[in-house]
Amino acid sequence: MPAPLPPYLAAYPASLTEPVARLLAEGRLGEALRRKYPTAHAIRTDRALHDYVQALRADHLRNAPQPSKILFDGKLQSVGRALGTHTRIARVQGGKLKTKHEIRIAAVFREAPPEFLRMIVAHELAHLKEGDHDKAFYALCCHIAPDYHQLEFDTRVYLCHLAAGGAPLWPAAV
């Protein structure tokens, strides 16, 4: 029986996690991921990420609030199961309450396939319109990234690979 997986796949049924555990135990999980997602995205800077997120927002959520800050965050790598965060910051300015939105993507995804980045950005953008992880929220995620659920699973599989001591699969060119 394969060793238990890291907690990234805890919410998934055994029928999905057992093949992942088997590949991990055999040392072939990274190879399987590289075969499915052969290339990394080219978005390396916070400015490029900002432009990418704003373009997706303009294409899919024209009426959503404008995020004031969008960046890769090195601190999110160590947080349990967070792939990215969306934060609402409310401040009183004069007699009005102003809300700013921040989107932060875990720095580990600076070197990942474009599909993984799109899924994470879709998730954080959906929070601009829907606060809870409910049916409407996931419908919005699927509107932005039609294969959202598969990509979320594959992204969590990659995190299992890293947690088990695997090397990054899409390192930046030196």
Image (spheres, rainbow, N blue to C red):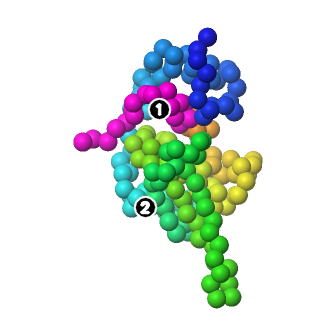
Question: In this picture, is 90 found above or below 114?
Answer: below
Q: Residue at x 34, y 38 (%)?
A: 171
Q: Residue at x 55, y 63 (%)?
A: 102
The residue carrying mark 2 is 51
Please provide percent x and percent y for residue 76.
52, 49
- Neighbor class of circle 2 (other Cα within 10 Å; few <14, some 14-19, many 20+) is few
Instruction: Name which quarter of the figure residue 125 lies in.
Output: bottom right
Magenta stretch: residue 69 in it?
A: no
Q: Earlier in the sequence, mark 2 or mark 1?
A: 2
- Look at the image and give the residue range highlighted in magenta: 154-174
Q: Callout 1: helix, strand or loop?
A: helix
Which residue in the rendered view is the most extreme toward the left?
A: 174
Please provide percent x and percent y for residue 17.
62, 23
**Amino acid type for the residue under numbered disc 1:** Leu
Q: Residue at x 27, y 41 (%)?
A: 173
Question: In this picture, is 159 found above or below 106?
Answer: above
Circle number at residue 162: 1
Which residue in the rendered view is the most extreme toward the right?
A: 135
**Amino acid type for the residue under numbered disc 2:** Asp
Can residue 114 be spotted in the picture?
Answer: no
Question: In this picture, is 11 found above or below 104?
Answer: above
In what quadrant of the picture does the C terminus appear? top left
Left or right of 137 on screen, residue 154 = left
Taking depth in this image into account, of 123 and 147 the one nearest to the observer is 123
Question: In this picture, is 156 found above or below 132?
Answer: above
